[in-house]
Amino acid sequence: MTFSQKCNEIFDRCVEAYHITDDIDAPVANPFADGTVEHVLFEKNLIDARQWHMEDIIRDPAIRPEAAIELKRRIDRSNQERTDMVEELDSLFRDKYASVTVLPDATINTETPAWALDRLSILALKIYHMAIEANRTDASAEHRARCAGKLDILLQQRTDLSGAIDTLLDDIAAGRKYMKVYRQMKMYNDADTNPVLYGAK
């Protein structure tokens, strides 16, 4: 099993586990041992699953303004957790490949392994929900056909992205590529860099 196949299996398992209750506040047990990359991958997808549904809820036209503000702030916190989790994964990759001798003509990739995995995690959720839409008995045949076509594209995207991730990791392991962990340095969550926050002090 390739690394991307393992990731897709973990992401799909997490998506299924979340949807047992389909509740953003319900606890979901992580089946993997703490400190393992599998544990981090499961937690990463769980953050994505909860945020996916928070994004649905906040678009309810009947949502109370106070509830929308509270939920928007929760989404912001979730985004920060998501970013922190990606950076944790990249740190694990950096440590894993720290002893690799980088070739003289090695190049850096446009994105790190963990940010590619971030997209793979989101794809698992898109595939799950598009499959539901493609099979909705209360929707029109046109809706189901349109969503089935989108599902085919999403599945192809997952195949392509999975292959690209495996190739990237192989290249890093062989010294053909090298990686750096760039912190996102988000400014809006930082009371020292968001002028609205430091101006309110």
Image (spheres, rainbow, N blue to C red):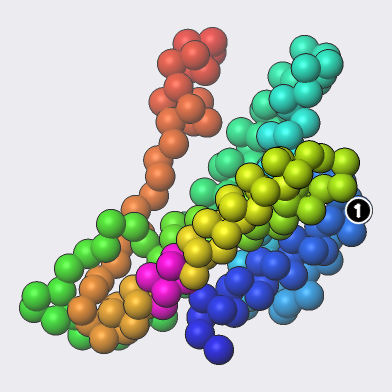
Place of residue 74 in the rendered image (x, y in percent of width and height, measured from the top left): 70, 33
- Residue 95 location (% of width, % of height): 40, 76
Number of marks in the rendered image? 1
Judging depth in this view, the residue of 21 and 33 nearest the camera is: 21
Report the magenta stretch's main SS. Answer: helix
Say if the magenta span includes residue 146: no
* The image quarter in which residue 127 lies: bottom right
- Residue type for callout 1: Thr
Is residue 110 visible in the rendered image? The answer is yes
Identify the residue at image location x=72%, y=47%.
Answer: 144
In the rendered image, the quadrant that contains the N terminus is bottom right
Is residue 94 at all visible to an observer of this figure?
Answer: no
Rendering coords of residue 34 (x, y %): 69, 74
Q: Is residue 174 left or right of residue 160?
A: left
Which residue appears farthest toward the right when viewing the image?
A: 21
Q: In the rendered view, tell whether residue 109 sits above or below residue 196.
A: below
Give how far across and how far down residue 101 sits, in percent: 21, 85
Question: Quarter-wise, where is residue 27 in the image?
Answer: bottom right
Residue in the image at 34% along x and 53% along y? 182
Left or right, residue 46 beside residue 150:
right
The answer to whether 85 is drawn above or below residue 185 in the figure is below
Say which residue appears at 82% left-offset and 18% top-offset: 63
Depicted 96 relative to depicted 13: above or below: below
Image point (74%, 70%), residue name: 13
Task: Please tell me whether mark 1 sits on a helix, a strand or a loop.
Answer: loop
> Up-down: is 155 above or below 26?
below
Q: Which residue is mark 1?
A: 21
Residue that lies at the very extreme toward the left in this rendered image: 104
The magenta region covers 160-166
Packing grade of label 1 (10 A; few <14, some 14-19, many >=20) is few
